[in-house]
Image (cartoon, rainbow, N blue to C red):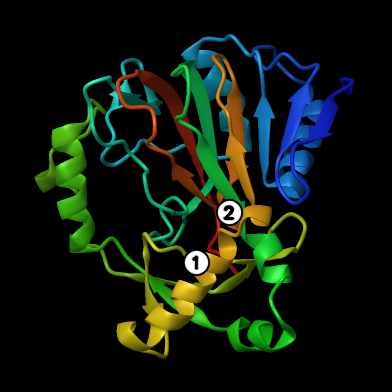
C-alpha cells in the first residue's frame, strides 16, 4: 500500500525533501517506486529524522541496486557496504573535496550515493550537488550539437595517488595505504552526453576528477571545452547545498550530477556513513 509521502522541492532545479516515511521499516514496492521516481526527477532527495541501524541502511539502499565494497575506503566492521567518512577536529583535509561523479573511471560507474549523518558539526560541512541534466538543457543548440554523440576518456590518474596520500596523512578517514590503490586500470570511454535509463533525460557526463580528455582530442585541446563545461555545471542555479542534521539521509543520482564535500568546519568532528550503488549497464 502506497504511503502518503510528503515531497517538497528544495530548489528550483535540484533537490527535494521527503517526509512522512520511516525508512527503517520494510517499505512496500509502491512506496519505494515513488521514492525512486522522485530521485530521478529531483536528482537529490533528503530524508530528515531517520534514526536507524547500519544494517537497516544497507537493506534500504541495497534496493536501488548492487552496492560497492569500496576499493580504498575501509568498511565499517560487520557492514562491508558501509564506508565511514570521518574528519576529526585536528584534521586539516577532508575526503571528496573536489567536484566528481563517483567512479566514472569504471565501465560500470556509480549510480547512487547514499550518505547518512551520524555526527555533524555545529556549522559547515555541507555537501554540494549540481544537476548536470539541467546544465545540459541550458546549453545552446550549437553546443549541444557539438557534444551529442561525442565520447570522453575517464581514468584513475597517478596524480590522484599523490593527492590521496596527502589526504590520508592529514585526515582520520579509514583509508587503505596509497600503494594499495588500484590505479593501473585502463581508461574507459563514456558519452559526454548520456541518457538517463529511467526517464531518458539527457545530462552532461564529465567531471574534473576522472575525465582525462575528449576521445578525438589531446588533453591540451580538450581542456578549454571541458573546463567550460565544469564551470557551467556548477552555476548556482544548478546546485543544491545539503545542510546536514543528525540522522538525515541524502541520496543523489550520480548519473546526472557531480558533488563536492565542503571543508569549512575546522576544529569540529563530522562522521558520515556512506553506501554507494553501482550501475548494472554502461552509460549510453
Residue drawn 59% across the image and 34% down it: 242
Q: Is residue 85 left or right of residue 39?
A: left
* Residue 48, position as x, y percentages in the image: 66, 19
Closer to us: 240 or 182: 240
* Residue 2, position as x, y percentages in the image: 89, 23
Image: 125 above or below 20 = below
Image: 145 above or below 284 = below
**Quadrant of the drawing holding the C terminus:** bottom right
- Which image quadrant is residue 85 in? top left
Alpha carbon separation for disc pair 2 and 1:
11 Å
Q: Residue furthest left?
A: 179
Mark 2 residue element: strand
Is residue 214 something that shows in the picture?
A: no
Q: Is residue 167 left or right of residue 272?
A: left
- The label on residue 30 is none
**Quadrant of the drawing holding the N terminus:** top right
Closer to us: 23 or 271: 271
Residue drawn 59% across the image and 9% down it: 51
Contact flag, marks 2 and 1 (Cβ < 8 Å):
no
Residue drawn 18% across the image and 53% down it: 161
Mark before the other along the chain sequence, 2 or 1: 1
The residue wearing badge 1 is 230
Q: Is residue 130 left or right of residue 134?
A: left
Is residue 77 something that shows in the picture?
A: yes
Residue drawn 50% across the image and 75% down it: 228
- Count neighbours of disc 1 (C-alpha within 10 A) and say few if under 14, some if 14 to 19, many if 20 or more: many
Mark 1 residue element: helix
- Which image quadrant is residue 71 in? top left
- The label on residue 257 is 2
* Residue 192, position as x, y percentages in the image: 54, 74
* Residue 152, position as x, y percentages in the image: 45, 76
Amino acid at each position: 500500500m502506497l504511503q502518503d509521502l510528503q515531497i517538497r522541492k528544495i530548489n528550483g532545479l535540484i533537490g527535494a525533501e521527503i517526509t512522512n516515511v520511516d525508512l527503517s521499516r520494510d517499505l512496500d514496492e509502491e512506496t519505494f517506486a515513488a521514492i525512486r521516481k522522485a530521485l530521478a526527477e529531483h536528482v537529490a532527495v533528503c530524508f530528515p529524522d531517520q534514526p536507524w541501524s547500519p544494517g537497516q541502511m544497507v537493506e534500504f539502499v541495497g534496493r536501488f541496486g548492487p552496492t560497492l565494497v569500496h576499493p580504498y575506503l575501509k568498511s565499517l566492521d560487520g557492514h562491508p557496504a558501509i564506508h565511514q567518512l570521518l574528519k576529526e577536529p585536528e584534521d586539516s583535509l577532508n575526503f571528496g573535496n573536489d567536484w566528481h561523479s563517483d567512479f566514472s573511471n569504471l565501465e560500470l560507474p556509480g549510480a547512487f550515493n547514499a550518505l547518512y549523518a551520524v555526527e555533524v558539526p555545529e556549522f559547515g560541512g555541507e555537501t554540494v550537488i549540481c544537476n548536470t541534466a539541467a546544465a545540459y538543457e541550458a546549453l545552446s543548440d550549437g553546443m549541444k550539437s557539438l557534444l551529442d554523440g561525442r565520447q570522453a576518456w575517464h581514468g584513475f590518474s597517478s596524480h590522484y595517488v599523490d593527492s590521496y596520500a596527502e589526504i590520508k596523512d592529514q585526515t582520520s578517514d579509514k583509508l587503505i595505504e596509497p600503494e594499495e590503490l588500484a590505479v593501473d586500470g585502463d581508461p574507459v570511454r563514456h558519452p559526454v552526453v548520456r541518457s538517463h535509463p529511467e526517464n531518458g533525460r539527457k545530462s552532461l557526463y564529465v567531471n574534473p576528477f576522472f575525465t582525462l580528455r575528449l576521445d578525438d582530442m589531446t588533453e591540451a585541446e580538450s581542456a578549454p571545452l571541458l573546463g567550460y563545461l565544469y564551470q557551467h555545471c556548477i552555476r548556482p542555479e544548478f546546485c543544491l547545498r545539503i545542510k546536514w542534521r543528525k540522522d538525515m539521509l541524502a541520496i543523489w543520482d550520480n548519473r546526472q550530477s557531480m558533488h563536492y564535500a565542503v571543508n569549512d568546519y575546522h576544529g569540529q568532528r563530522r562522521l558520515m556513513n556512506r553506501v554507494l550503488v553501482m550501475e548494472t549497464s554502461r552509460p549510453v
